[in-house]
Amino acid sequence: MAYSEKVIDHYENPRNVGAFAKDDPTVATGMVGAPACGDVMKLQIKVSADGIIEDAKFKTYGCGSAIASSSLVTEWVKGKSLAEAAMIKNTDIAQELALPPVKIHCSILAEDAIKAAIEDYKSRHGS
Amino acid sequence: MKLPIYLDYAATTPVDPRVAEKMMQFLTMDGDFGNPASRSHRFGWQAEEAVEIARSQIAELINADPREIVFTSGATESNNLAIKGAAQFYHKKGKHLITCKTEHKATLDTMRALEREGFEVTYLEVEASGLLDLDKLKAAMRPDTTVVSVMFVNNEIGVIQDIAAIGELCRANGTIFHVDSAQAAGKVEIDLQALKVDLMSFSAHKIYGPKGIGALYVRRKPRIRLEAQTHGGGHERGMRSGTLPTHQIVGMGEAFRIAKLEMAAENARFATLRQRLWDGIQDIEQVFLNGDAQKRVPGITNISFNYVEGESLIMALKDIAVSSGSACTSASLEPSYVLRALGLTDELAHSSIRFSIGRFTTEEQIDHTIKIVHEAIDKLRAMSPLWDMYKDGVDLNTVAWVAH
C-alpha cells in the first residue's frame, strides 16, 4: 500500500481534529458514510454572522486516505463563504492528495461531508 | 531495537540459519548439485541420498513412513493434488465433497474448480469459536461423500480443529480425509500412526524452511490413490512429476528435524510471549480475542479493536509487521471471510489484527508492540466519531447511516 506523502502527512499530523459544542448556534455538522462501508466522516463548521466559515473540525473513522481527505477539507473550507465551500469538488481533493483509484470514494465522502454540513447550517438558519 | 518488528510468522518465517547453511551445500559445483533422478553417476546418487534423508526427517516429525511423503512446491500445490487427485480418482464412488468455510483459499478455490467439473461441495459453517461442530459434519456426510478436507490449524485465528475425531467420522463413512497442516507442523503434535488422516499437506516456509517446497503425505495403509495433476517423468511414484529441487528438499528436511527437537521448548516460550502480549492489550476497552481461547496454537493471536478502522490501524502500526486477515487477502479491501464466518460484523472484521510470533520474537519486541498498539488505538479513537458515539451511549445499530 503506497500512500502519497501528502496523505501520510495529513494522517500523521491531522489538522483540526476535534468537535465544537453541539449547542452552539453558529455550528453546523455533517456526518456521512457508514461503519459497514469502512468510513464515517463528521465535519463541523463554525459560521460567522456574515456567512463565512471561521473554523472547522473533523473526526473520521476510516482509512488513511479518508482521514487525510477530511483533514484537508477542514483547511480548505476555513475563510470561505458557504457558497464557495460548496464549490469544493472531490476531484480537487483527490488530485491534491494524489489518491489512487481505489481511494477516490474517500474524496467523494469528504465533498459530501462539506455539503451535509452546509445543508445542516441552512436548515437551522432557514436561508 | 530494530524496526519494524516482525510479527507475521504465520505469513512466512525467515529461513533458520542452520537450514540455510545446509541448503548451500547442494547448489554449486563444489556441492551435491546432481539430479536425484540420475542413476548413472555419483552426482545423482549423492543428491538422491540427501533427498531420502530429508524425506525421513519429514516423516519422523509426523510419525509417518518416508514412502508416504510426496514432494510438491508447497501447501497450495499439496492441497490441489490431494483434493483434486482423490476426488477425480474416486469419482465413480461418489461426487460429494465436504470442507469448511474458514479453510485457506488453496482449499476453497480447489473446491470451486471441482464444482465446475461437476462435483458437489458442502461448505460447513463454523461455531463462533472457529471450531467445527462435529454433529454438523456428521449430518453433512453421505454415502457418496468421497473427500472431507479440514485444516489442522487455522492460519488467521490459530484455532486447532479436532482432527482425531473428524478422522474417526471419515473412516467410519469410508471417506478420504485430507488435512491442510501448513500452520500445524512443528506447532502441534502430529502422529499419523494414531490419526485417521489419509492425506496431509505441508509447507516448509511456515517452519523456518525455504519457500517453494512442500509435501503431501499420502497414506499407504489403507492405500490412498490419486489422479496425478502434474504429468512428466513419473517422479514421486508418478504422483508429482518434475525434477526434485535437492537444496529445497534438504532445507525442508532440516527445518522439520529442528522442529522435532525444539518444538516443545519453543511452544512453551511462545505461550509465555502470547500471554504477555494479550495481558498488555486486553486492558484496552472494546478489544476482543478472535477464535477459541483454549484450542489454539500459541503463535497466532487475532484481536479485534472496536471503533477503529483496519487500514488506518495497520498504518498506525507501521513499526510492527502484522497483517489484517491473511497475507493472501490483505491486498483487497474486503474484510476477512474467516472472521465473517465466526459471525463478526464487517466493522469488527475490518479492524482485526493478526499478531503471529515465532522463533526470533523477543520479550522486548512484545513490550514495544504493546506500547505501539496502545498509542495507535488512543490516536485513532481520539479521531473516531464512532468512539465518541459509543462513549455517549449511542447504539450504532440504531443510527440512520448515509451509506455510499
Image (spheres, coloured by chain):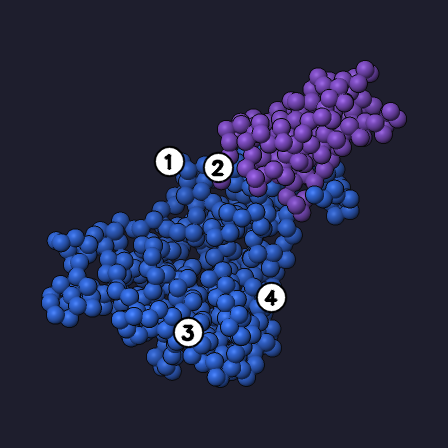
- Residue at image mark 4: B125
Measuring from the top left, give residue B136's x and y in whole percent. 60, 73
Who's blue, chain-wise? Answer: B
Question: Could you tell which of marks 4 and 1 lies nearer the N-terminus?
Answer: 1
Residue at the spot of label 2: A2
Circle on res. B85 = 3
- Indicate the amino acid at tag 3: Gly
Quarter of the image for residue A66 reads: top right
Task: Tell me if mark 1 has few (under 14), some (14-19) or many (20+) residues whose alpha carbon lies within 10 angstroms of its own.
Answer: few
Picture mark count: 4
Q: Nearer the viewer, mark 2 or mark 4?
A: 2
User: Label 4 is found on which chain of the structure?
Assistant: B
- For disc 1, the marked residue is B2
Residue A6 appears in the figure? yes
Q: Residue at x 26, y 64 (%)?
A: B244
Q: Position of residue B325 (x, y in %)?
A: 52, 51
Image point (54%, 77%), residue name: B96
Mark nearer the viewer, 1 or 2: 2
The tag on residue B97 is none
